[in-house]
Amino acid sequence: MTPRDTASDRLRDRIAARFESPALRWGGIGLILVLMAVLPAALGQYATVIMTNALLYVVLALGLNVVVGFAGLLDLGYAAFFAVGAYTIGILTLDFGVNFWLALPVAVLAAAIAGVIIGGPTLRLRSDYLAIVTLGFGEIVRFSARNLAITGKASGLSGIGQPWLFGWHIATPTDFYFVFCALAILAVVVSLRLENSRLGRAWLYVRHDEDVAEAMGINRVAVKLAAYVTGAIFAAIGGAFFAANLGAISPESFSFTQSVLILMAVILGGMGKIPGVILGAFIVILGPELLRNLGELRLMVFAVMLLLIMLFRPSGIWPKRGVRS
């Protein structure tokens, strides 16, 4: 490394430390919360729907960040847990008449059990082998949803009712916007607590070197399974509210493309860096919308922009401190 590179890195760390000071951090958080509160009234219904979708991806990306960013596991079938949460809510509320809030814990439990069933025997694998297994799991769930009668086959489920909360009927786009705001804030808080916990440190050790972590007394399979199940719970909660928001779900909503978009948000923002993952989720969802005036060229232009970002910032737009791009 040249002296110039060292000076540049020191300057970047100094600027980052200044922006991460407690006063500036809490001031920024307060400003973001105020902007989130006034956004529906300021931008209108269409923008509110887009922002709701972006907040959903924040929840999903933070869940996948536990798996990929914290524990270092490559998961290409994350949309499967998203589907488990959505379909569990749809089946219980439509076919059995269960209240949404009573069905929500069942959806979370179903995703956790699915994570244990798939992750238990497969998390002993590493890198590409694990990615292939998770990809297969995602496709199995999608094709099962397309062919089973209880999931509505290819047409999916429709008529899923919106929940009530203390007399408040959560039904309008603005209502769901604030619900997903709350979910995103909760996901951030839980992610921060997990990152700074004993389990979070174990994930960090396993991510850097599984063999050394195991030599230190860490049960690498149990630790990786905990990350896998935690990510599944995030996805199930997002899927449950996604189903309630749309009122209808189909297998195409949980394709491999969805898994790739969520993974893209994590990698683009900066794996393991919670603010970076949030930024990545907003870029993935809002980027194509901001380029909508370009018509058919918008996705190509967006893809080129993503390619340039990854070429010049291979560690992500907002990587963890100490990770050089």
Image (cartoon, rainbow, N blue to C red):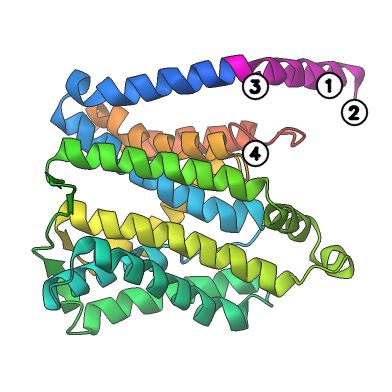
| Structural distance between the alpha carbons of marks 4 and 2 | 18 Å
Give the quarter of the figure containing the C terminus.
top right
**Residue 260's x, y, as percent?**
45, 55
**Residue 261's x, y, as percent?**
42, 50
Residue at image mark 1:
5
Task: State the image quarter where residue 67 is shown.
Answer: bottom right
Label 2 or label 3, whichever lies nearer to me, is 3
**Residue 200's x, y, as percent?**
68, 53
Are the residues flagged by discs 1 and 3 in contact, CB closer than 8 Å? no
Give the quarter of the figure containing the N terminus.
top right
Q: Which label number is shown at residue 20? A: 3
> Does residue 156 sit above or below 44 in this rendering?
below
Mark 3 lies on a secondary structure that is: loop
- Please rate how many residues cluster around mark 1, counting C-alpha atoms within 10 Å: few if below 14, some from 14 to 19, many from 20: few
Residue at image mark 2:
1
Residue at image position (83%, 69%) is 214
Mark 2 lies on a secondary structure that is: loop
The stretch in magenta equals 1-23
Q: What residue type is labelled 1?
A: Asp
> Does residue 89 sit above or below 169 in this rendering?
below
- Please rate how many residues cluster around mark 4, counting C-alpha atoms within 10 Å: few if below 14, some from 14 to 19, many from 20: some
**Residue 143's x, y, as percent?**
31, 78
N-term mark: 3 or 4: 3
| Structural distance between the alpha carbons of marks 2 and 3 | 26 Å
N-term mark: 2 or 3: 2
N-term mark: 1 or 3: 1
Residue at image mark 4:
314
